[in-house]
């Protein structure tokens, strides 16, 4: 495996991990933003909304750069020039990315199921209507996160092929 391929796969894995963490961070921020709007008597909604848009843009930028523009990051950080020799791995880059996507999907699923169960337990214990339950948005967020985790885990090969196809890179 060439060092460039190693760095490409490593950066893609890091980018996917950061991008998928947005499924937790952005709903938490939206929840905080909602509480701020409801309980705040300030009129600085524009600044808070601008901050939310900025966070979403940062996550999209990370996804674009780390997953689809890894070549640019490797060139700017000069990662290829620090390691001259090849890495002795007889595994294709798509196989490493495939395994990594499956692991990330499994971790997403494994992390969301306990939180979903805890929130559902709290919901059934309080006997509220789903609309009146104050954590109903978290139930939906955990369900979506679990579904995405299962889909990544079960379709990791197709996701890896899609990433390599979109970037136009050769599967080494």
Image (spheres, helix red, strand yellow):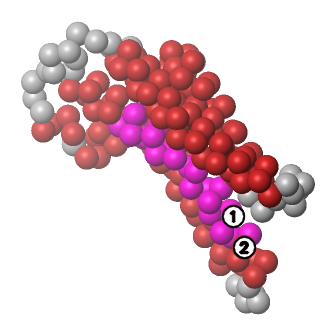
Task: Tell me if 30 is positioned left or right of 106 in this view.
Answer: right
Q: Residue placed farthest to the left in the image? A: 85
* Distance of label 1 from label 2 (alpha carbons): 6 Å
Give the residues drawn in magenta, as a range: 11-34
- The residue drawn where x is 52% and y is 47% is 21
Task: Tell me if 122 is positioned left or right of 96 in this view.
Answer: right
Which quadrant of the rendered structure holds the N terminus? top left
Asked which quadrant contains residue 15, the reply is top left
Under tag 1, what secondary structure? helix
- The residue drawn where x is 74% and y is 85% is 40
Asked which quadrant contains residue 83, the reply is top left
- What percent of the width, then of the height, locates residue 44? 70, 84
Asked if residue 68 shows in the view, the reply is no
Name the residue carrying label 1. 31
- What percent of the width, then of the height, locates residue 153? 53, 23
Task: Tell me if 31 is positioned left or right of 83 in this view.
Answer: right
User: Which of the pair 112/159 is nearer the observer?
Assistant: 112
Name the residue carrying label 2. 35
> Dominant secondary structure of the magenta stretch?
helix
How busy is the neighbourhood of tag 2: few (under 14 within 10 Å), some, or many (20 plus)?
few
User: Which of the pair 142/157 is nearer the observer?
Assistant: 142
- What percent of the width, then of the height, locates residue 143? 70, 39
Under tag 2, what secondary structure? helix
- The residue drawn where x is 76% and y is 89% is 41
Q: Are marks 1 and 2 in contact (CB under 8 Å)?
A: yes
Q: Say if the magenta span includes residue 45.
A: no
């Amino acid at each position: 495996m060439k060092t460039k391929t190693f760095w490409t796969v490593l950066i893609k894995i890091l980018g996917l991990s950061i991008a998928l963490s947005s499924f937790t961070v952005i709903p938490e921020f939206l929840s905080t933003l909602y509480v701020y709007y409801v309980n705040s008597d300030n009129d600085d909604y524009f600044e808070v909304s601008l901050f939310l848009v900025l966070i979403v843009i940062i996550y999209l930028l990370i996804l674009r750069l780390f997953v689809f523009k890894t070549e640019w990051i490797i060139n700017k950080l000069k990662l290829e020039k620090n390691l001259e020799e090849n890495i002795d791995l007889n595994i294709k880059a798509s196989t490493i990315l495939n395994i990594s996507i499956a692991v990330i999907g499994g971790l997403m699923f494994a992390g969301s199921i306990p939180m979903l169960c805890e929130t559902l337990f709290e919901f059934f214990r309080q006997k509220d209507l789903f609309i009146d339950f104050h954590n109903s948005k978290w139930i939906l967020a955990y369900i979506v996160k679990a579904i995405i985790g299962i889909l990544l885990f079960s379709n990791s090969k197709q996701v890896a092929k899609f990433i390599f196809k979109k970037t136009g890179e050769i599967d080494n």
